[in-house]
Structure formats: structure tokens, C-alpha cells
Image (cartoon, grey):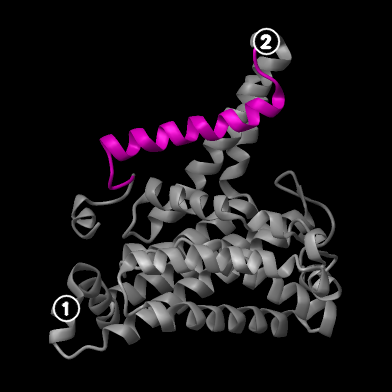
Amino acid sequence: MDFGFIFSSALGELFSPTTAAYALAALGLAVHFGYSGLLNFGQAGFMAVGAYGFAISTLTFNAPFFVALLVSVICSVIFAFILGIPTLRLRADYLAIVTIAAAEIVRYVVTTNQLTKVTGSANGLAAFENTFYAMNPFPEGSYMGMNNRDFFIRVVGWGLVVVCCVLVWLLMRSPWGRVLKGIREDENAVRSLGKNVYAYKMQALVIGGVLGALAGMIFTLPRGAVQPSNYGTELTFFLWTCLLLGGMATVLGPVIGAMIFWVVLSLTQSLLYGLIESGAVTWLTTVQAGQLRYILVGVALMLLMIFRPQGVFGNKKELAFA
């Protein structure tokens, strides 16, 4: 096995566009659960709404990039209101049930045959990224071993992560953020002080949902296609893994968690494939190895929950509300 290639490939996932998308979506979950106590199991739905909003606006209505971006954000806000209006006055477990169901509803709706001309049904949509790459300021050539398109999407993706992290950090240090943390700890106490808990929860749901929509766009642009199969419940659980790895009520935690998640996932897959190809492991096929890596990551996550439940950058005080 070429261990040098295996480790360099794994480290390459640190700043991949997919990692940036996971970091953004996990940051949205941090706003929802880490800072607000909202148990959202439907972040994949927000990512799908953002991705399809952008793709449909571009392909069906020939919208410019920034108009399509605005449509994507507006769609995520509407989706947040649809989820939040009937559930935010109820217990957190009701929100969890509704969000996971809503994400699946979105995925099944876009696969409806009657909407094939708009959503592409099970095949999804493709060739909508041209308006984005038309803004690429980098001329053709090699940039740190990448072509100009790959380099551009990484710069945009991680630039967006930095901007969103700064905004969330500023929000959580503001009076608004302090009220949100109070709601997380004891919403009845905050309500007794005259604060509109329902409105604060709705605002947090919208902000985290917008981050999810932006993540959905970054997730699809490098592929040049959006497919409903990519937005199943397993995507939300991967995002929760990233959040728990880094720390629930931190700004950098979800970002570092996403990096760790993708490096470990890539490393375990490459090592397993290398062992199979070298003949050192004969009782596994490459298909089985692909599933085994998720089992290994799951075991690692369980060990993390046992020995460091607050995450890599978290604080034990975060666990008081969990």
C-alpha cells in the first residue's frame, strides 16, 4: 500500500467543498440545538430546499446567480416557517419528529413523476453551475495542484464558512444570543422576564435553516448536479456527527468536526481498500468495506460520547441542557 498517497488523499478532504458544506450545515445545527435547544433532525431538508431552489431558478427561469441565491434563501425561510409555526410551542421531541418527516417529504416530492420537468424526478437536475463559474476570477492554470474551477469553489465555500462563523459568533455574543442561550437553559424563566420565546425560537430556526440552504448550494456546485438520493436522513445524521465531534455550543466546533469526520472517513476507506487490494484482507469486498467505514466511525463516535461527550472544543457546561 502507498501510505503516503493514502494520507495525502485523506488530508485533502480537510478543505474540500464537501467539507465546507458539512461545516456550514453543522453550524446551522449548532444555532438550532447548541444555542437554542431546538432538536432539528431535518437539516438535510434545508440543504435540499437550498440546492433545488438554486437549480430550479437557474434552469427553469434562467435567473442570474445572485437572484437564484436569493430564491434559495427565501425558500429556506419559508420552509423554516412551515416547520416552526405548528411545532415551536410544543416540546422538543415533537420538533424532532416533524423535521425528520419534513425532510423526507421534500425528498419524495422532488422525485414525483409529475414534477419531472421541474425537479428532474429521481434523476435530479444538472448543468446549472455555469452562472457560478462564470464569475471565476482565476485564469486557467494550476493552483496548489487544482484547476481554476476547483480552486474557485474552495475559496468561495471556505470564505462563506468564515463569514458565517463570524456572524454566528457576533450574534451569540449579542443580547439576542444571550436570550437564546437562556431559552436553551430554561425557557420558562426567560418567558417570565417578558421575552417572546416563540419569536426567538423561530428566528433561530430561520437562521440555522439559511445556513443549511447555503450548505446545500456549496454541496452541489462542485458536482454540477443535485440528486434527491443525496439528501436522505443519513445526511442529517452525518451532520449531527460533525456537530458532536466538535462541540454543540461552539462556533468553530462544527467546522473542526466536519474536517475530522471527512478525514477519518476518507482515511478508513482508503486503508480498507488498500488492505483488500494487497490481499492482506480476503474476507471483505470493496462494497462491504464501504459500509464498514461507517461502522468504524460510529464506534469512534460512541467512544467520544463516553470519554468526551462535550466534543473536541466543547465545554461540559454545554451538557447541562441536554
Return the residue at label 2.
282
Q: Residue at x 31, y 66 (%)?
A: 37
Quarter of the figure that contains the N terminus: top right
- Can residue 73 be found in the magenta stretch? no
Cβ–Cβ below 8 Å for labels 1 and 2?
no
Other-residue count near label 2 (Cα within 10 Å), few / some / many at <14 / 14–19 / ≥20: few
Which one is in front, 70 or 141? 70
Q: Residue at x 78, y 71 (%)?
A: 119
Q: Amino acid at mark 2?
A: Thr
Picture quarter containing residue 191? bottom left
Horizontal and vertical percent position of residue 282 = 67, 10
Horizontal and vertical percent position of residue 97 = 44, 64
Q: Is residue 287 above or below residue 159?
A: above
Which one is in front, 125 or 273? 125
Q: Amino acid at mark 1?
A: Asn
Q: Is residue 20 above or below residue 195?
A: above
Horizontal and vertical percent position of residue 173 = 28, 74
The answer to whether 20 appears left or right of 279 in the picture is: left
Q: Residue at x 35, y 64 (%)?
A: 93
Return the residue at label 1.
188
* Residue segment shown in magenta: 283-311
Quarter of the figure that contains the C terminus: bottom left
Which one is in front, 293 or 109? 109
Q: Residue furthest bottom?
A: 194
